[in-house]
Image (cartoon, rainbow, N blue to C red):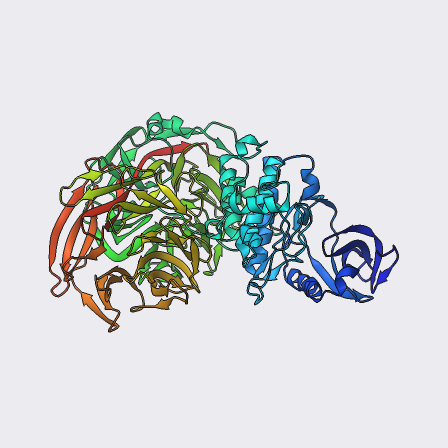
């Protein structure tokens, strides 16, 4: 124990603060900079322990390498009479343990603390540092309510060679962790003495969050042995029996953190922070975690898939009352004028320049998508004399930009850009692959986003490429001054998770917002060149209207119980938006009899089903309901039994023997999870440098996976990966996306741009096959091995065609169509291995168009 006045170099001891598991802590004055600091000195009993000395020095090195507002800052390191010490910032406040002595925390305060802890862990994990002793005693709350994570003395670099050499040795449920952690806050892998990674900290985080919101420890038992057994085998006490201060959404976050298997937890602290931020609101993020005021996460989390959020269908009949909500700026009532009454889906809508009319494209009842003109005073859409088309943009002079022969890709479509007067006529085709478009204020130039060679481009004017992405770019909008572009940037194709980006007059790109689970609809605020409005959703909530300025400050503008999509904002402030109701429907069809089995979905986001090798079960992923930001990989037998949640994951597929499921883990970076059907251990596979994935398939040998993904700043292509180890290796030509294996496993049918290409894995030769249409998707090999089955979407259904490999001859095989076609699109079709069953998912999206007045 050091007395007041003792000097350690330039530091003068003022008083004792306390003692921890590895040393004593003092308040001191730094005479050089005239500031108060904290000094931690390794206690004498540890000096002879070389391992503890090494870990003390490691604490200094690892924490000093971190520079984050939610982690205790290290200033210096030294030695006093043979005892090493480190110097850190001096904090005034209380530990979280002291805060919890008064009972559970209010939800808002707990959410602020949780977000700060998650951001601090994310910063450490990004540098390969794991804490391994996260507990309330090591979390400090300053007097101005800032979170600081303390004591990285037990941290190890994630790539440490000694990671497998450590054993857990603890003696008391109340004694601080002597070697690796504190009993009651350890992860199951820590208790077992197994290697740990960032997900171990996430488990510990879950125990702390549980305690903040209930006032009770998640796994507290009478002895350390019983506590460790509870961590390994038991679940925390039912929250309904505790003084629960949370909501069901918070309960889901805790449950995901406390999964026994690491592969089922949040896969990164950044994903965890994103989930918390989506519940807490962007204002919490900006004030509690970022010194710059930015609320953009350091690592963007994973994807969202096939999202058209909404409420019960009956609410669609409630006319303007559907949007009873509030504005964050004014409490004045908002007036809604309903423009459509037909049952169907609104693709796009724009105000005509004079504001008296609205042009829209929609699919109503059992009819194909059409362009309509509607007047607010007489809400009966009148069809424009045009072929089936989707609206892209409307010029000030009344010229329409359309998408012809559109191909749907889950959340966006590509088609042929064409222009035609609003009065109708024959559209003039310009170029293919266009996703979105917008006219400059003078109507002379057009900005577009389109797909070219597997990448999405932003061009302004048409032909001048300003920006590219391996995901997709949508909703491009030109500012009123004409010198800035706003657009939605989606990191994964086939997914509407995304964020708002801008390009200024110098071509500089800037991300303005965090990544949201669903982002659909953008418009510049009325008469503004500095404010962008958009509709987004997070954590299973309906899409709401937000605004963001050019500095990245996000604010809530309007919310309601029901989802909405923003289409346009008039110069007088009127807002054109639609209410949305959607669900995914899963159906199996017996090919021989045509008998359909409906209702196989779980919640409202069941997608991408496949059939098991024995034809008795299906597999899909669920992104709706309580699935959470990482979604659920779902196994369901066709005997009427309930769905089974295998664990987190997106697109999934059965192994050839039907005993294992491979599923995309929607983490950053992505991984592949292997789930057993029945008893067995789950495990996760690293994808090396692959930063985005879109699909996966098993090789027929059951030992390898075909991964469709992309490296940083590269286009999608196919990779081969051994499930027993090894990095993914490119397979096939660059840009080729493999899909279906021949029965002998030697040939793989895939797509290269718009071509059907057969790749022979044995000879490494590629064969182009004629006959594939732009709107067709590869389904499977024909049973004779001489043809490829493809499917294309038709109104309310799909058709299956056989393409002969040798000649390219096309033969229609079968056509399926639902009786009720309203709002039904986005079919994803699979064929069972025995060729007896089709299973498909489709989106049933219904919407109603409104003009809103009074939103500010």
Q: Quadrant location of the N terminus?
A: bottom right
Residue 314, quarter of the rendered image = top left
Q: How many marks?
A: 0
Residue 100, position as x, y percentages in the image: 67, 38
Residue 321, quarter of the rendered image = top left
Considering depth in this image, is 208 or 6 the residue closer to the camera? 208
Considering depth in this image, is 413 or 648 the residue closer to the camera? 648
Residue 250, position as x, y percentages in the image: 52, 39
Q: Can residue 393 be seen here?
A: no
Is 671 displayed left or right of 733 in the figure?
Answer: right
Residue 543, quarter of the rendered image = top left
Considering depth in this image, is 427 or 807 the residue closer to the camera? 807
Is 436 displayed left or right of 767 in the figure?
Answer: right
Considering depth in this image, is 664 or 466 the residue closer to the camera? 664
Residue at left 52%, top 29%?
331
Residue at left 25%, top 72%?
762
Q: Can residue 625 be seen here?
A: yes
Residue 463, position as x, y percentages in the image: 33, 62
Is 165 displayed left or right of 349 in the figure?
Answer: right
Residue 740, position as x, y percentages in the image: 24, 59
């Amino acid at each position: 124990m050091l007395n007041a006045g003792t000097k350690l170099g330039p530091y003068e001891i003022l008083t004792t603060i306390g003692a921890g598991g590895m040393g004593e802590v003092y308040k001191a004055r730094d005479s050089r900079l005239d500031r108060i600091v904290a000094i931690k000195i390794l206690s004498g009993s540890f000096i002879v322990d070389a391992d503890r000395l090494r870990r003390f020095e490691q604490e200094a090195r690892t924490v000093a390498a971190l520079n984050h507002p939610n982690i205790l800052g290290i200033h210096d390191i030294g030695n006093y009479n043979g005892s090493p010490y480190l110097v850190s910032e001096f904090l005034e406040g209380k530990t979280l343990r002291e805060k919890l002595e008064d009972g559970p925390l209010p939800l808002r305060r707990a959410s602020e603390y949780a977000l700060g802890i998650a951001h601090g862990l994310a910063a450490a994990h990004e540098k390969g540092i794991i804490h391994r002793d996260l507990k309330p005693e090591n979390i400090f709350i300053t007097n101005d309510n800032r979170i600081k994570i303390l004591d990285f003395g037990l941290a190890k670099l994630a790539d440490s060679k000694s990671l497998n050499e450590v054993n857990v040795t603890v003696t008391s449920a109340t004694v601080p962790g002597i070697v690796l952690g504190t009993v009651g806050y350890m992860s199951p892998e820590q208790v077992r003495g197994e290697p740990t990674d960032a997900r171990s900290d996430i488990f510990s985080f879950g125990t702390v969050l549980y305690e903040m919101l209930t006032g009770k420890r998640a796994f507290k038992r009478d002895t350390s042995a019983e506590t460790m057994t509870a961590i390994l085998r038991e679940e925390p006490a039912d929250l309904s029996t505790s003084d629960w201060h949370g909501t069901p959404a918070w309960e889901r976050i805790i449950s995901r953190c406390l999964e026994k298997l690491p592969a089922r937890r949040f896969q990164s602290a950044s994903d965890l922070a994103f989930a918390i931020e989506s519940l807490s609101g962007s204002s919490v993020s900006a004030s509690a975690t970022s010194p710059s005021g930015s609320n953009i996460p350091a690592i963007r989390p994973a994807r969202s898939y096939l999202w058209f959020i909404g409420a019960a269908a009956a609410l669609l009949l409630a006319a303007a009352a559907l949007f009873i909500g509030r504005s964050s700026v004014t409490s004045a009532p908002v007036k809604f004028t309903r423009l459509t009454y037909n049952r169907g889906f609104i693709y796009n809508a724009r105000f005509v320049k004079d504001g008296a009319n609205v042009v829209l494209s929609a699919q109503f009842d059992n009819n194909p998508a059409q362009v309509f003109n509607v007047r607010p005073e007489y809400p009966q859409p009148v069809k424009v004399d045009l072929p089936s088309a989707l609206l892209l943009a409307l010029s000030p002079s009344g010229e329409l930009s359309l998408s012809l022969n559109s191909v749907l890709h889950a959340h966006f479509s590509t088609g042929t850009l064409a222009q035609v007067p609003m009065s109708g006529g024959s559209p003039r085709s310009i170029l293919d692959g266009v996703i979105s478009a917008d006219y400059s204020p003078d109507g002379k130039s057009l900005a577009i986003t389109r797909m070219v060679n597997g990448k999405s481009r932003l061009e302004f004017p048409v032909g001048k490429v300003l920006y590219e992405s391996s995901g997709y770019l949508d909703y491009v909008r030109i500012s009123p001054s004409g010198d800035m572009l706003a657009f939605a940037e989606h990191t994964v194709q086939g997914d509407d998770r995304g964020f708002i980006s801008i390009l200024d007059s110098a071509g500089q790109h800037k991300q303005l917002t965090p990544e949201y689970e669903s982002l659909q609809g953008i418009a510049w605020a009325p008469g503004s060149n500095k404010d962008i409005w958009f509709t987004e959703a997070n954590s299973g909530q309906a899409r709401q209207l937000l605004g963001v300025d050019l500095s990245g400050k996000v604010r809530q503008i309007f919310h309601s119980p029901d989802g909405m999509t923003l289409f346009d904002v008039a110069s007088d402030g009127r807002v054109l938006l639609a209410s949305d109701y959607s669900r995914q429907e899963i159906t199996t069809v017996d090919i021989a009899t045509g008998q359909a089995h409906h209702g196989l979905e779980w919640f409202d986001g069941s997608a991408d089903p496949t059939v098991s090798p024995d034809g008795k079960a299906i597999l899909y992923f669920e992104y709706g309901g309580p699935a959470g930001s990482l979604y659920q990989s779902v196994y369901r037998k066709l005997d009427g039994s309930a769905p089974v949640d295998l664990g987190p994951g997106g697109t999934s597929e059965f192994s050839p023997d039907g005993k294992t499921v491979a599923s995309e883990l929607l983490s950053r970076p992505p991984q592949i999870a292997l789930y057993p059907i029945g008893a067995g251990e789950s495990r996760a596979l690293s994808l090396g440098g692959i930063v985005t994935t879109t699909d996966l398939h098993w090789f027929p040998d059951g030992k390898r996976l075909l991964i469709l993904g992309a490296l940083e700043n590269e286009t999608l292509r196919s990779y081969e990966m051994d499930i027993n180890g090894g990095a993914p290796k490119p397979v096939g030509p660059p840009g080729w996306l493999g899909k279906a294996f021949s029965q002998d496993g030697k040939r793989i049918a895939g797509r290269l741009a718009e071509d059907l290409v057969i790749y022979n894995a044995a000879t490494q030769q590629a064969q182009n096959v004629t006959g594939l249409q732009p709107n067709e998707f590869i389904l499977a090999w024909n049973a004779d091995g001489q043809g490829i089955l493809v499917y294309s979407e038709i109104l309310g259904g799909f058709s299956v065609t056989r393409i002969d490999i040798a000649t390219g001859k096309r033969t229609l095989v079968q056509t399926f169509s639902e009786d009720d076609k309203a709002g039904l699109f986005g079919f994803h079709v699979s064929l069972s291995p025995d060729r007896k069953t089709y299973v498909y998912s489709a989106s049933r999206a219904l919407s109603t168009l409104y003009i809103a007045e009074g939103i500010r």
